[in-house]
Amino acid sequence: MTRRSRIFVHAFTAALLVLLYAGASGQAELRIDITGGNVAPMPIAIPALAGDGPNAQTGRDIATVVSADLERSGLFRPLDPHSFIENVSASNAQPRFPDWRQINAQALVTGAVNAQSDGRLRVEFRLWDVFAEQQLAGYSYTTTQQNWRRIAHIIADEIYKRITGEEGYFDTRVVYVAETGPQDKRIKRLAIMDQDGANNRILTDGRALVLTPRFSPTAQEITYLSYGSGAPRVYLFNIDTGQQEVIGDFPGMTFAPRFSPDGNRVILSQAENGVSNLFTLDLRTRRATRLTDSEAIDTSPCFSPDGSKVVFNSDRGGSQQLYVMNADGSDVKRISFGSGKYGTPVWSPRGDLIAFTKIDGGSFFIGVMRPDGSGERLLTRDFLVEGPTWAPNGRVLMYFRQTPSDSRGYGGSSRLFSIDLTGSNQREVITPQDASDPAWSPLLR
Amino acid sequence: MHKALSFAIGALLLLSACSSPEQPSPGGPQATGGPGGPGGFGARRGAPGSQQELEASAGDRVFFAFDQSDISPEGRETLARQADWLRRYPNVTVTVEGHCDERGTREYNLALGERRAQAVKNVLVAMGIPASRISTISYGKERPAVVGSTEEAYAQNRRGVTVVN
């Protein structure tokens, strides 16, 4: 095992957030209403942030990352920089709004990158309403040179928040399983990347089969399944140290782990003698508490964001369906009643919905329903789609899609996709290798 | 004499496996290429007490219906032969692997694979093999025996495999 593989996660040392200038208070409403279905993306101009010398390149790079984040959300349409009339040179100057109105930009981002005497970067940006000729937001950030991508994601989050009224999700990471090799001898490794696919890193060496990684609420630890000790067991992986350890002292197999919202416990399944039941494991005392005692398969448990409830799937009623119970295991209620089988329920960070995998009529679906089981909506259907995970704002889901394979092993590729809660804006999340079992981190700050 | 006889039994079993309606076709141990490799059925008997010998003389696996863990009558016959074989080698211990096809969710299939492995173990124990000689492990849908997204492949992948430790 790579007990001490060096994982570089730079502590984010930014001194953050100096409010540059509060925009005129709340009446100017440049706003995207994202409660509906297909919205027309808002045209936004994001010229390179101004900067001298090497900072000019950083300013261009930041603008590129901000544009890509906003474009991928499906809610914004960054305009081609070649169409820009005004050459913005300083972020504090009032833009020439008619120049931006002429190219139909509704919003404009200006900013600057400066190196401080200590070598750190000072990045500032302002968001403008082109038609109202008002500043909507303005912040500056100070950080190390290598953190420029995170600054870009934080800026994109601020823009998203100011215009949609909801928290962003760009300053996040995704942990997943990177896959290589033939279908019957698949090599699987834990991998982590920024939400946009940058900074992809492989975390485990592939000697042990690993599955289903999930972030802790601080995004510093991952709980996952590994065959590293021979038998399948739930492990913890510390991202800072690279340390891997088995958790819990259970007979039989442990699997399907997820953190509790406070990060102090892991909820998991334990299988023995043909039945699988749910337990929580306190990470401080290492004490296990049984939640279910059925003769069935109870698995894929997930806490509600307030920690008061657990959703899971069980075949106790004869087929695989979703159930909700209190966090102490009491008051179990079935919530899925549609046709087919339901699995991998995941509670939205907003608490209002539960995403799931559904198998019906030979197809797989990703869908959502309310925690009482009402309002089921299927977002996507394919040969095999599985394992939804929520962006921290509860607006976007990621999952994996596997294509059919033939008898010679061709096909069978597995890739990550994201989709809006409305079912629109389905996109592949580009990974260097095949990928499965994605899990989205909370916002990093 | 003994050797020739058991070879004849092995050949007979192959025939019955192929003709059985419940066995996935093209069924039988040679299609699955376990540790014994794809060699001829009687050609590689393997050392006494070895995996190859288990495969040749008893068959190393049983198959399951979709989302089920019941042992079929044919599977029970295979396990009876495995039990006979295990009685011949009282020092041999085995691990029963439970496997699933790809048409289920990953975590549910891990649990289903464990249930299948346990079902095989329970039958062997009922046939008199000490539970202490049999451990179980589930691979869910992670290790298909046959590649391909076809019903034929799925039928061969829903299996319990007895592996000599």
Image: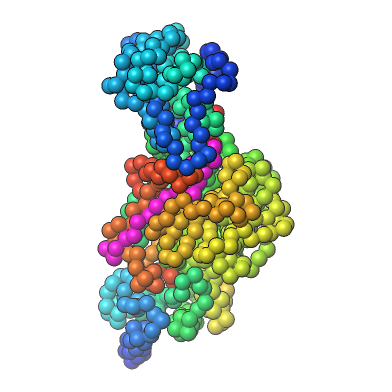
Q: Which residues are magenta?
A: A388-408
Residue at 44% across, 71% down: B159
Q: In the image, residue A359 lies at what x, y percent?
A: 47, 61
Q: In the image, residue B108 lies at what x, y percent?
A: 52, 61
Q: Is residue B114 visible?
A: no
Residue B70 versus residue A391 in the image, above or below: below
Residue A349 is left or right of residue A105, and the answer is: right
Name the one closer to the observer, A199 or A52.
Answer: A52
How many numbered marks appear? 0
Is residue A384 part of the magenta span, yes or no?
A: no
Display colour scheme = rainbow
Name the one closer to the observer, A200 or A31.
Answer: A31
Residue at 39% across, 80% down: B23
Q: Is residue A152 visible?
A: yes
Q: In the image, residue A238 lies at what x, y percent?
A: 53, 39
Residue B159 is left or right of residue A216, and the answer is: left
Residue at 52% across, 43% down: A390
Residue at 33% across, 42% down: A432
Is residue A398 part of the magenta span, yes or no?
A: yes
Residue A238 versus residue B12 in the image, above or below: above
Q: In the image, residue A331 lies at what x, y percent?
A: 72, 58
